[in-house]
Amino acid sequence: MRPRIGLLQKALTDYEAGRYYSTVLVVLSVMDGFVNDLDTAVRQGLHARPVEDMVAWDSVAGHHLGLSHAHQSFLKGFYKTDDTKVTELFRNGIMHGTLVNFDNEVVATKAWNRLFAVADWADSRERQAKPVEPTPTLREALRQWKDTQDQKTRIEEWQPYEYETDPATEELSDVAQTSRDFLESWEKRRWGPVGAHFMELGSARSSVGKLAVLAKDLYGTLELSEWTVLRVRHVAAAVAHTDVELLVSGTMYRTDLRWVRVDDTGSTATEWESGHWALSQYGPSLFLKPETAVIEPDNDR
C-alpha cells in the first residue's frame, strides 16, 4: 500500500472537499493495484478475484464473510449507460463509464470502507499463510519448564574462575585456542579468518568477504609482530577475557580481549551449551588504548 499513499492522501483531500467522484475513482484504482501486487506469481486485480476468495478468515474489521458478500455488487456487470443515482459501489459500471451518477458521499464512503476491508483481508491472507506452530504437549511443556529451571539453577551456582595458559600444552581451553587463532590470523594478515572471529548480533550473518573487508579496514595498518596469551578469566557463564601481550607496530600492549559465547542463531550461550566464542569488542581501538601501552624504563638514566 505504501507506494499508493500519495494517491490516497489526494483522495482524502477530495473527499473532504466534496469531490466524491474523484475519491471513488482513485480509491477503486488503488484497491485494484494493491490486490494485484499481493501475489506477483499470479497477478489478479480485485475485480478479477472470485467471491469465494474474498473471505477474511480472522478479520478484525468485521464479519469474516462481510467482504465476500459486498464483493458480489463489486463484480456486477453493467452494459449500458444509466444515469440513475447510484448508492452502491458498483465497480464494473463506474470504472467502465456506464454508471455516471455516482458523485455522492454514500458511494465515496463505501469506497473507503471497502479499502479498509481489503487491507484487512490482505493481512488475514498473510497471517493464514504462516505455518502454525504446534502446541506443545503436557509432557513437552513440563520438560521445557524443567530445562529452564535447571539452566537457571546452573547459572546461579556458577562461579567466576581463571587460569594461566601454557604454550607447551597441546590441549588448550576453547577460549585460549580461539584467542590464539585470532592473533595468529592477525599476525599473518589473513583477513577472512580474522573477521570470522567478530561477534554479530542477531541471526543475520555477514558474508565471509564482507567480514574480511571489515577486518582489513580495522587491522590493515596495525602490524602484529609478537603476541602471547597470558591468562583466561571467565567472568560470567558466557563471557571470558583473555589477558594478552601484543607488540603492535613497535608498541607493546598489555591488554585483554573480551569473548562472548554465542550459538548458531547469534544468541548468547553458556559455556556448557553448544556454541563458539566470538570477539565482542573487535575494534582494535577498544583494547589498544594508550593506558594499555607498556612504557619501557629508560636504562640510560
Image (cartoon, rainbow, N blue to C red):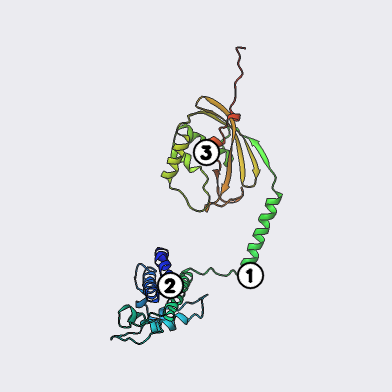
Position of 179 relative to 29 (above/below): above
Q: Which amino acid does label 1 sit on?
A: Leu
Mark identifier at residue 17: 2
Q: Nearer the viewer, residue 27 or 141?
A: 27
x and y percent of residue 3 in the render? Answer: 39, 63
Residue at image x 42%, y 65%? 5
The mark closer to the camera, 2 or 3, is 2
Residue 153's disc is none
> Looking at the image, which residue is at 55% across and 37% down?
179
Quarter where residue 240 is shown: top right
Q: Do the residues labelled 2 and 1 touch (CB within 8 Å)?
A: no
Mark 2 vs mark 1: which is more N-terminal? 2
Quadrant where the N terminus sits is bottom left
Instruction: Indicate the position of residue 48 as horizontal and vertical percent values.
Output: 34, 77
In three-dimensional space, the C-alpha distance between marks 2 and 1, rounded to whole angstroms, equals: 60 Å
Q: Which of marks 2 and 1 is in front?
A: 2
Q: Nearer the viewer, residue 228 or 301?
A: 301
Pointer 1 residue: 138
Sequence-first disc among 1 and 3: 1
Three-letter residue code for mark 3: Gly
Indicate the quadrant where residue 230 lies.
top right
Crowd around label 2: few <14 · some 14–19 · many ≥20 (10 Å): few
| Label whose residue precedes the other's in the sequence (2 or 3) | 2
On the rendered image, what quadrant is the C terminus found in? top right
